[in-house]
Amino acid sequence: MGVEVVVEGLSKSFGPQTIWRDVTLTLPPGEISVLLGPSGTGKSVFLKSLVGLLKPEEGRVLIDGVDVCTCSEGDLYEVRKLFGVLFQDGALFGSMNLFDNIAFPLREHTRKSESDVRAVVLEKMEMVGLLGAEDKLPGEISGGMRKRAGLARALVLDPEIILFDEPDSGLDPVRTAYLNQLIVDLNAQIDATFLIVTHDIGTARTVPDNIGMLFRRNLVMFGPREVLLTSTEPVVEQFLNGRRQGPIGMSEEKDAGQAAAELAALRDGEAGVPHIVPQLDVTEGMPERSAVRRRQDRVMQRFGTLPEQAQQEIAKALSPRERARYFGDPTGSWPTGPVLAPQQVAQVTAPTPRPSPEPRAGARTPDAPPEEGARRRWFGRRRGGDR
Ligand SMILES: Nc1ncnc2c1ncn2[C@@H]1O[C@H](COP(=O)(O)OP(=O)(O)OP(=O)(O)O)[C@@H](O)[C@H]1O
């Protein structure tokens, strides 16, 4: 199973420009999460912070017990081996064929023999449907194939966390649909923790188990897909409908009065979030996604704390057997919990306190987590800025 990623009170600025502040979320191990947000809200900065390429001023990013914001270079090197990253353009070397591009991390970071390298590369190329294209140069193949080659390269070190930076950028809707299916199938095969940054509403609605959204330098919410996909937050509605009316402006936010006037002028049928659609299932013949059952148990444990709309969508999707398991009533009714305001939802979907994960052998043991009352002070500690 993939590794849990715990983000606590993370804030990042560049000089006087605050990118986001006090971001807290947990990427559950082995699940697929999506991070949405208008352009420029700092999604790529967030990904770079998770792998320690950028250093936030406050907060922690705990990966396998190691805080990547403060750990030593040696620990960071080890932690990075847990990650695979799919960059927007695949980040392939133009002068190398696909085989050598995909073999590159193995030749750089392992002592595998050439025959072992070959076996791993061909296995990953098969996983992404590129077998037979080993000799092609990146310039000779389509954008979709380049993405898949980038994905095969991200897989060769058997990562436990995969970050996808806009995997659908530059792809037509059909290629995007194929890539989305590939992502779900890969998750079933390797059970790693996935985080996808995307603008594609179709991807957000069909691929992830969890969705978060950045806006106005804050994490608006993060939690089970049903929470965001049924949210009536104006910014979420605007984004999911891909419309101009709402708080998101052309290049920056609109003032609240203008956004409210636009929303009030919407005609019937233009307001509200689109109907929730089922999540993509794995392709026939693939293993089941282990994350689905784990997520179901996790979400059902906090069912009563979720907004009513989200509760209804979650309950609707349960089989009679699952209803019996969670509610003791296979026929239909379920106990709905208290309805929460969106700000509260962000809080209840934040990570639950739990024991610190077992550190890997040789990993630095993190400092004990602060008590609630000491949290501000703890996060207020200066960590040396952008090192
Ligand atoms: N190294 C850097 N130094 C200074 N500013 C930076 C740096 N990296 C990013 N920024 C700024 O941080 C902000 C957020 O950038 P980022 O690329 O993370 O946004 P994004 O949400 O990923 O956007 P998009 O969806 O358009 O890709 C931008 O204003 C960008 O100019």
Image (cartoon, rainbow, N blue to C red):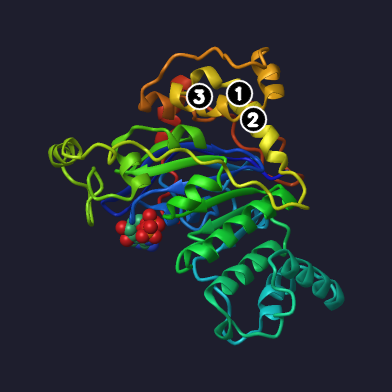
Q: Mark 2 falls on what kind of element?
A: helix
Give the spatial CA distance, label 3 vs label 1: 12 Å
Would the CB of label 3 be found within 8 Å of ligand 1?
no
Give the spatial CA distance, label 1 vs label 2: 6 Å
On the question of residue 224 being in view, the answer is no
Question: Residue at the location (57% across, 24% down)?
Answer: 315
On the question of residue 169 being in view, the answer is yes
Q: Which residue is mark 3?
A: 312
User: Badge 2: how crowded within 10 Å, few (<14), some, or many (20+)?
Assistant: some
Q: Nearer the viewer, mark 3 or mark 1?
A: 3
> Sequence order check: which comes first, mark 3 or mark 1?
1
Residue 137 image position (x, y, % from top left): 62, 85
Q: Quadrant of the N terminus?
A: top right
Q: Amino acid at mark 2?
A: Gln
Q: Which residue is mark 1?
A: 300
Residue 246 image position (x, y, % from top left): 23, 43
The image quadrant where one finds ligand 1 is bottom left
**Quadrant housing residue 39:** bottom left
Q: Which residue is mark 2?
A: 296
Vertically, is 235 above or below 300? Answer: below
Q: Amino acid at mark 3?
A: Gln
Residue 59 image position (x, y, % from top left): 46, 39
Question: Residue at the location (62% across, 56% down)?
Answer: 181
Q: Quadrant of the C terminus?
A: bottom left
Q: Amino acid at mark 1?
A: Met
Q: Mark 3 falls on what kind of element?
A: helix
Give the spatial CA distance, label 2 vs label 3: 14 Å
Q: Is residue 187 left or right of residue 95?
A: right
